Image (tube, rainbow, N blue to C red):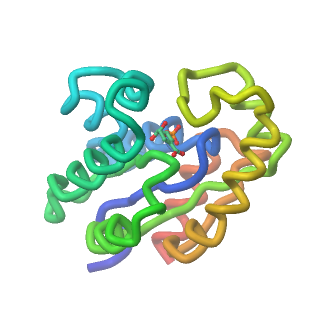
Amino acid sequence: MTGTERSIILIGFMGTGKSAVGQQLAQFTGRVCLDTDEMVAQACGMPISQIFERLGEERFRDEESAVLHELDADLPSVIVTGGGVVLRPANVARLRELGSVVCLRADLPTLVRRLEKGSGRPLLAAENLADTVERLLLERQPLYDDAADFTVDTSALGPKQVALAIQDALAR
Ligand code: S3P
């Protein structure tokens, strides 16, 4: 199976543009776009912020892992994941089973600018956004790097340009 016949999975830190790029890729490829955050929210019957608040982060992670196992490996789709999906090695193994894993990244000032607008992300509720983003990125960058087949920097690109770059790379 070639890169373009398998699912395309987007991983990466919050604010790297996974959702917008996923929508664009779905449009270009005619595939369905599945968002694991949305699937978790639906399974729990509440938004992500409430899942963290009422049930805790660990429960959210359990639901996230469960959702990955419900995805159909035989249906080539675009799969958008939450920024913490790489925290569990079993999740990464599952994603690699499902298709090509593409990491989106962006530089720190760009991430902070994009995330400043606020979006109900529970992990970013702390006082100093830049410090929190920097700390989480330091912890996670090696995990993103290990999990990805390749990475696209979205700092200076719009969703359409990023989606085109991904399609190009997969067609090679
Ligand atoms: C998280 C990222 C969020 C969501 C949850 C936890 C994380 O998804 O899954 O708030 O740990 O980085 P986005 O990356 O789509 O914001």
Residue at 58%, 22% (x, y): give it: 119
> 38 or 27: nearer the eye?
38
Check the image and report above or below for 119 versus 132. Answer: above
Please give left or right for residue 121 compared with residue 59 in the image.
Answer: right
Residue 145 position within the rendered picture, expressed as x and y whole percent measured from the top left: 60, 72
Check the image and report above or below for 133 versus 49. Answer: below
Looking at the image, can residue 5 be seen? no
Q: Quadrant of residue 34?
A: top left
Residue at 28%, 50% (x, y): give it: 62
> 102 or 159: nearer the eye?
102
> 56 or 46: nearer the eye?
56
Check the image and report above or below for 12 versus 40. Answer: below
Please give left or right for residue 18 compared with residue 139 in the image.
Answer: left
Q: Quadrant of the N terminus?
A: bottom left
Check the image and report above or below for 3 versus 83. Answer: below
Please give left or right for residue 41 compared with residue 157 in the image.
Answer: left
Residue 84 position within the rendered picture, expressed as x and y whole percent measured from the top left: 49, 52
Residue at 15%, 57% (x, y): give it: 72
Looking at the image, can residue 114 be seen? yes
